[in-house]
Every structure is written in structure tokens, then in C-alpha cells.
Image: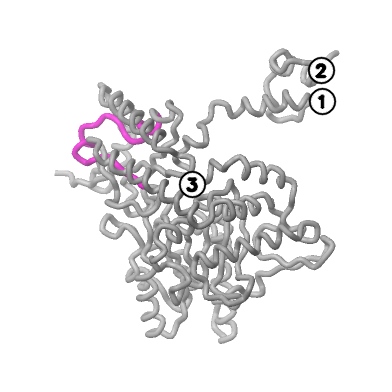
């Protein structure tokens, strides 16, 4: 009896004339036999057909556009494992060159020819490495002084990215969160210092908060921390999570002090696959000097043909992203990066202005400091509206856009907001198309006769302890 799961087809078989296209794609068992690459390609391609096109995904921070030469270069390196330094020694040198370039963008004071840093799969791993280094430095000093090391903590705003929660859980380091409020929309240095003690391994300000797009004031924090450390005798450092801002500020605001020019900034992490303009996954972490990278973080093996030492949570990793980053540095140069980031900011500011003019909406912040921003429904509008921003998200998705709606962090979690991230590849024409689609979606939603399920659900969810919250999150007391 013929096996119906067998993949028939040869080089002469038309893709949509093959028996394979009459069968469902594999779910839980590998097919009994092979099929042609053309048919396999089409089946996998069709699985993703109905998804949002990457350049219309305004929720993601990661790069969705690189030029043809960059894409070609990365595709040609797809089989290269970076860690095989004996086989690909020039890739290792190229990686070191990228670290040098990034360190100098951040005004490193290190005098060594090769700056102290590490490659990462993304900014999440880069954050982990920065956090682990701070933890190990603290631990080594405590052990040398004969003090306990069982209660480490770090301080960060409630606007943290989830990697810091993972770091706290995996390394058993207490995460002390500084609440955000409508008055204090970024990390409050004074509040952060009140949470510090002898067990604090570092404070983590964020340049480009994922939730809001805002920047913490690292210079103000450094000033307050300097006085605090002098008063207490501690030496609590700063690790800057610059996943987004690390590739924005050096080009658009080089005079702004947030980096290694500040005394207590000992490490910085960033995402190469965000505004570093490289396809995922790529991250970088740089230390102020090699003395701040604990030797215990370096691991060596000799089973690849030579003694290879590496810093990182992952061992094997793709080399293609390194080539992509180095290509972008050569191709664009400082001026090219500046022009692209400038255009991203201009389009973001344009959207910020136009959305702010729309009757239902109000922007969360008055200024745009990174190529992303958030907005919410005006309280007076929200009281009468029969829809929520989740409904608007769904409407825009029908037009191909992914514009996320979500609640803000703890303490201001009653606010439901929407966010736009304007990356390379997002043009002014696309911005106009988005604005028109938002206007049309709102017009349709305003015709609703009855509240949507999300509106009903939100009204129920925001009844908390005697207070009723409108679905924008603006609180008003029960009379």
C-alpha cells in the first residue's frame, strides 16, 4: 500500500501540481521521504504568508532592513561558527575591531590597543554579562574582606526589560525596583540611592526604556552616586543598559554625557541588531578597562585546534552578524549612521506630532529622545468611548501593521498605551499610510453602538479597592 505521507516530486514536477501540496505540512512526525527543495521552500514560505511584513512591524526593535550587499555578505557567512578562531581567525580580529569602534563611540578611557568587551547574541546576553561582572566583582571584594555574600542586590527602574528579571532569578540577585510615576517617568537618582546598601552590586540606568522610549539621567545619577559612595565608603558602580540608546546618542547627541566619561559607569551593553542596524541576533558589552572584567568570566578550551578563550554565556554563535556589523561601520561611517538615525528621529517626531493632534489621543511625553514613543487615550474621550487601544491594535493588524497596545509597569499599570518604533526602512510615505489607517480605524470604532469585549473587560479589571479606572488608566474616585 502506498504511503500517503511520502513526498512525491522531482525536478519536473510543478510545485502546485505536486501531491505534496494536497497534504498538510508535518506537525509531529518527520515525513517518510524527501521532497524537492522548491516544494519544501514553498511549504515553509506559505506557513508565514499571512504574517505582518517585517517592515510594517512597528512593535519590534530589531533591524528589518539591510541593503543587498550586507544581506549577501551575511548569507555567505551563515555557516561560519565564530568560536572556531583557528579556522576563521580574521573573524575574531573583525570582532575585536567592532568592540574597539563601539568602545570609542562611548568615549572609552582604556589605552590598550584592543578594548575590553564581548560579543553577545543580543542585548539580553550583553546585559547578563554586565550584571554577572558586577556581581563577581562585588563577591570577590566581599570574600577578600571576610564578609558574607549571600544577599546581593541591584537597583533598576520599574521600566526594566525582562532580561533583568531573568538575571535576578538565575543568579539569585535581588532586583530592587524604583517605581515610575507620571511625575517621575524615568529613574529617580535619589530614590535609587535610598535602595542601595553594602550588598548593592550596581545600579542600572536605561538609555531607551522599552516601555516608553525615554532615557534615564545617567549624569545626574553619577553625580548623586559619587557623593553617596564617598559618604558611605561603598564603591557601587553603574552598568548602563543602552540597548537602544547606545547607537543613537553617539550620533545625534555626542555632547550628552551618559557613557564612560562618567566616573562610575564601568560597563555598557547595547543591541547591534536594533539601532546598530544589523539583522538579529547581535549584542555588545564593553567594560571601562580590563580590570573591571573578572578573570573568572573567561573560559578556555583547546579541543578546536588551539587554546581559545571566550567571555560569554553562549559558546557557539553565528559569525554572520559580526560581518554585518563591520560592514555597516565601513559602509555608513559616522556620517551615514548619523543620517539614518536622524531620519528615524524625524519620522518619529512627525508621527508624535500628528498622533498628538488626533482627538482621542495624548502623547505620554512631550519630547522624543529615541526613535520610539507611546500614547494613550485622553481621559475625557475614554469615558465615552466604546473601544480600547487593543481594538485599535486589532484594526491596524487587519491593514498589515503591528502597533502594540500594552499596560505600563507596576505602579502605573492602569495605563494602556500604544507604541511605535521607527527603524531604518520606515519612510515618510509609510508614516503617512499608517496615519491614514489610524484615522480610518478610529472612524470605524467611533461608529460602534455597543462596547467591545475588551472595553467591557478593562472596565471590570480596573475596579480595584474602591477606585475605578477608566480604560486609559486615568484614576477617578467613586463618588
Q: What residue lies at 58% left-to-right and 51% top-to-bottom?
A: 331
> Are the residues flagged by discs 1 and 2 in contact, CB closer than 8 Å?
yes
Q: Which residues are magenta?
A: 373-394
* As drawn, 216 above or below 276: below
Q: Which mark is residue 169?
A: none
Find disc 2 in the rendering and name its residue.
Answer: 3
Kind of element beneath mark 3: loop
Q: Is residue 204 at all visible to an observer of this figure?
A: yes
**Does residue 373 appear left or right of residue 307 in this picture?**
left
Q: Which mark is residue 61?
A: 3
Q: Can you tell which quarter of the image residue 36 is in?
A: top right
Is-magenta flag for residue 384? yes
Find disc 1 in the rendering and name its residue.
Answer: 33
**Which of the two labelled residues, at mark 1 and mark 2, occupies the earlier sequence position?**
2
Instruction: Estimate the x, y position of residue 396 in percent, counting from the top left.
Output: 40, 30
**Front-most of 69 and 176?**
69
> Are the residues flagged by discs 3 and 2 in contact, CB closer than 8 Å?
no
The residues bearing labels 1 and 2 have C-alpha atoms spaced at a distance of 10 Å
Instruction: Estimate the x, y position of residue 102 in percent, counting from the top left.
Output: 55, 63
Kind of element beneath mark 2: loop
**Does residue 423 appear left or right of residue 322 in this picture?**
left
* As drawn, 413 above or below 254: above
**Which of the two labelled residues, at mark 3 and mark 2, occupies the earlier sequence position?**
2
> Which dot, 3 or 1, sits closer to the camera?
3
Q: Can you tell which quarter of the image residue 447 is in?
A: top left
Question: Which scheme is used to colour this image of the protein?
Answer: one colour
**Residue found at the far left of this picture:** 479
Amino acid at each position: 500500500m502506498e504511503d500517503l505521507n511520502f513526498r512525491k516530486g522531482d525536478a519536473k514536477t510543478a510545485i502546485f501540481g505536486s501531491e505534496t501540496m494536497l497534504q498538510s505540512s508535518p506537525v509531529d512526525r518527520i515525513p517518510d521521504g524527501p521532497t524537492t527543495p522548491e516544494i519544501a521552500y514553498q511549504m515553509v514560505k506559505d506557513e508565514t504568508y499571512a504574517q505582518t511584513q517585517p517592515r510594517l512591524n512597528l512593535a519590534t526593535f530589531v533591524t528589518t532592513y539591510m541593503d543587498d550587499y550586507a544581506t549577501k555578505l551575511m548569507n555567505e557567512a551563515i555557516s561560519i561558527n565564530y568560536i572556531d578562531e583557528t579556522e576563521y581567525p580574521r573573524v575574531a580580529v573583525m570582532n575585536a575591531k567592532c568592540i574597539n569602534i563601539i568602545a570609542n563611540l562611548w568615549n572609552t578611557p582604556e589605552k590598550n590597543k584592543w578594548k575590553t568587551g564581548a560579543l553577545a547574541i543580543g542585548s539580553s546576553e550583553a546585559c547578563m554579562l554586565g550584571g554577572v561582572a558586577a556581581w563577581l566583582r562585588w563577591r570577590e571584594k566581599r570574600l577578600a574582606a571576610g564578609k558574607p555574600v549571600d544577599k546581593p542586590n541591584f537597583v533598576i527602574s520599574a521600566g526594566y526589560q525582562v532580561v533583568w528579571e531573568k538575571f535576578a532569578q538565575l543568579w539569585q540577585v535581588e532586583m530592587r525596583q524604583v517605581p515610575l510615576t507620571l511625575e517621575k517617568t524615568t529613574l529617580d537618582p535619589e530614590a535609587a540611592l535610598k535602595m542601595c546598601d553594602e550588598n548593592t552590586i550596581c545600579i542600572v540606568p536605561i538609555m531607551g526604556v522599552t516601555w516608553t522610549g525615554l532615557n534615564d539621567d545617567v549624569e545626574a545619577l553619577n553625580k548623586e552616586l559619587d557623593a553617596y559612595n564617598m559618604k558611605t565608603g561603598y564603591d557601587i558602580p553603574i552598568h548602563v543598559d543602552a540597548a537602544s540608546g547606545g547607537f543613537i546618542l553617539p550620533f545625534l547627541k555626542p555632547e550628552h554625557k551618559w557613557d564612560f566619561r562618567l566616573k562610575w559607569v564601568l560597563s555598557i551593553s547595547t543591541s547591534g541588531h536594533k539601532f546598530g542596524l544589523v539583522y538579529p541576533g547581535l549584542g555588545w558589552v564593553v567594560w571601562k578597562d580590563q580590570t573591571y572584567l573578572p578573570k573568572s568570566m573567561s573560559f578556555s578550551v583547546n579541543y578546536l585546534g588551539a587554546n581559545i578563550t571566550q567571555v560569554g554565556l553562549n559558546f557557539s554563535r553565528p559569525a554572520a552578524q559580526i560581518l554585518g556589523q563591520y560592514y555597516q561601520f565601513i559602509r555608513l561611517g559616522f556620517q551615514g549612521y548619523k543620517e539614518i538615525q536622524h531620519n528615524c528621529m524625524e519620522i518619529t517626531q512627525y508621527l508624535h506630532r500628528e498622533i498628538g493632534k488626533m482627538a482621542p489621543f495624548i502623547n505620554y511625553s512631550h519630547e522624543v529622545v529615541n526613535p520610539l514613543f507611546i500614547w494613550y487615550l485622553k481621559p475625557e474621550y475614554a469615558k465615552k468611548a466604546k473601544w480600547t487601544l487593543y481594538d485599535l491594535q486589532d484594526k491596524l493588524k487587519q491593514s498589515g501593521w503591528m502597533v502594540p497596545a500594552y499596560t505600563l509597569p507596576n505602579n502605573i499599570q492602569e495605563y494602556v498605551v500604544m507604541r511605535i518604533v521607527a527603524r531604518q526602512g520606515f519612510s515618510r510615505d509609510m508614516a503617512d499610510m499608517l496615519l491614514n489607517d489610524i484615522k480610518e480605524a478610529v472612524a470605524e470604532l467611533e461608529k460602534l453602538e455597543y462596547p467591545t469585549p475588551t472595553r467591557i473587560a478593562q472596565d471590570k479589571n480596573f475596579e480595584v479597592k474602591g477606585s475605578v479606572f477608566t480604560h486609559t488608566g486615568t484614576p477617578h474616585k467613586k463618588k
